[in-house]
């Protein structure tokens, strides 16, 4: 289970860290709030490909990372 998601230099996100609690987590927000960007970052953790335009301008690279809950 995903416990924490950290994103740097990805799309419009400079630096973001989100911790998730046990149980169901719903990501909600207004249009343009970054919900899809967060999901795309999770997809990258599991070997999805990112388009070069998803890396922030002048950034050296994207850095999605995660922490899992211990079962």
Image: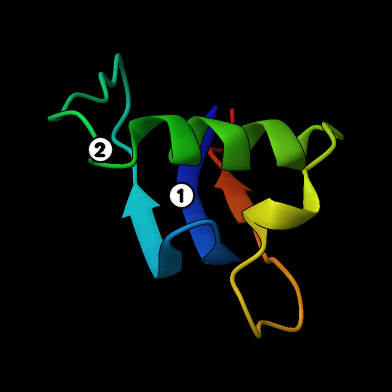
Q: Residue at x 55, y 27 (%)?
A: 1
* Horizontal side of residue 41 vs 44, given as left or right: left
Q: Are marks 1 and 2 in contact (CB under 8 Å)?
A: no
Q: Residue at x 46, y 40 (%)?
A: 38
Measure how far apart labels 1 and 2 are at the Cα level: 22 Å
Q: Residue at x 53, y 38 (%)?
A: 69
Numbered circle sitting on residue 32: 2
Residue tagged 1: 4
Residue 10 drawn at (x, y percent): 57, 60
* Horizontal side of residue 2 vs 51, given as left or right: left
Q: Residues within 10 Å of mark 1 (few under 14, many from 20)?
A: some
Height in image: 26 above or below 67? above
Viewer-nearest residue: 10 or 2:
10
Residue 26 drawn at (x, y percent): 25, 18
- For residue 59, which quarter of the picture? bottom right
- For residue 61, which quarter of the picture? bottom right
Q: Residue at x 32, y 27 (%)?
A: 22
């Amino acid at each position: 289970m995903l416990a924490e998601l950290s994103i740097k230099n990805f799309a419009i996100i400079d630096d973001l860290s989100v911790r998730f609690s046990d149980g169901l987590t719903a990501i909600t927000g207004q249009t343009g709030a970054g919900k899809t960007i967060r999901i795309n970052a999770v997809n990258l953790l599991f070997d999805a490909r990112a388009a070069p335009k998803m890396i922030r301008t002048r950034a050296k690279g994207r850095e999605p990372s995660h922490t899992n809950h211990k079962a």
